[in-house]
Image (cartoon, rainbow, N blue to C red):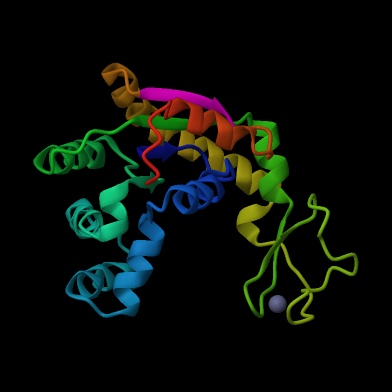
Amino acid sequence: MRMIFLGPPGAGKGTQAVKLASKYGIAHISTGDMLRYHVKNGTDLGEKAKAYMDSGRLVPDDLIIEMVKERLEEEDAKRGFILDGFPRTVNQAEALEVLLKSKDITLDAVVLFDVDEETLVRRLSGRRICPNCNAIYNVHNSDYPEDGRCKRCGNGLIQRDDDRPEVVRRRLKVYEEETAPLLDYYRNKGSLISVDASSESDAVLYAIVSLYGGKDDSN
Ligand SMILES: [Zn+2]
């Protein structure tokens, strides 16, 4: 399975990517995780990326692509991969295409997680975090602690400013504007497939697995 997952914040891309990666023993590649890994381990790429991050600038595309390239050379990624939230721009998509072509890799699909705005606002604004240990909860989940305290460390849970409904709406609008050209790019190539991700059940997972068709190469 070789796929790109695209979709707004709160659409559940990461959750499904983790499940599928473990089901098929393939790589879950998220730029956030990759950046953290390189910075934490002080690799050459990490040092370069850190200089940008420390000065509040965006890490340039060629650095990210270099990280993706390295990651694709690892064992699990040779079996398959899910790119989670990458590419974000048409420039990145074009660079990725060159990279994949050079490695003779073909994508199975670019999957768009389709969720209506109200559902996303409800999900994201329900998030609460523990400022002490960074555990994440959601007031809409059945396991949300009744006393509003972290189950791990007992600290009071808070809502991040980013998760306030009006901020969430703004984030979604920015996302939509920024991503529209990227969606067009993949739509024009005929590789974009939408899945209805408004339900949080495993229906999304089955929908994606069925896109992958009978090509079960989980061996
Ligand atoms: Zn905690």
Query: Which corner quadrant of the image does residue 187 belong to?
Result: top left
Q: Is residue 168 magenta?
A: no
| Residue closest to the eye, 154 or 27 | 27
* Quarter containing the N terminus: top left
Taking the spot 90% from the left edge, 69% from the top edge, the residue there is: 147
Question: Is residue 56 shown to the viewer in this render?
Answer: no
Is residue 23 found left or right of 168 in the rendered image? Answer: left
* Rendering coords of residue 10 (x, y %): 59, 45
Taking the spot 31% from the left edge, 18% from the top edge, the residue there is: 190
* Rendering coords of residue 127 (x, y %): 70, 56
- Above or below residue 156? Residue 217 is above
Q: Is residue 193 magenta?
A: yes
Is residue 212 found left or right of 45 in the rendered image? Answer: right
Ligand 1 quarter of the rendering: bottom right
Query: Which corner quadrant of the image does residue 70 belong to?
Result: bottom left
Taking the spot 49% from the left edge, 49% from the top edge, the residue there is: 23
- Above or below residue 16? Residue 133 is below
In the image as oriented, which residue stretches furthest toward the front? 219
* Rendering coords of residue 78 (x, y %): 25, 51
Report the magenta residues as a range. Answer: 192-197
Question: Is residue 186 shown to the viewer in this render?
Answer: yes
**Tag count:** 0
In the image as oriented, which residue stretches furthest toward the left? 102
Taking the spot 90% from the left edge, 65% from the top edge, the residue there is: 146
- Magenta segment's dominant SS is strand
| Residue closest to the eye, 63 or 25 | 25
* Rendering coords of residue 17 (x, y %): 48, 47
Is residue 93 found left or right of 146 in the rendered image? Answer: left
In the image as oriented, which residue stretches furthest toward the right? 146
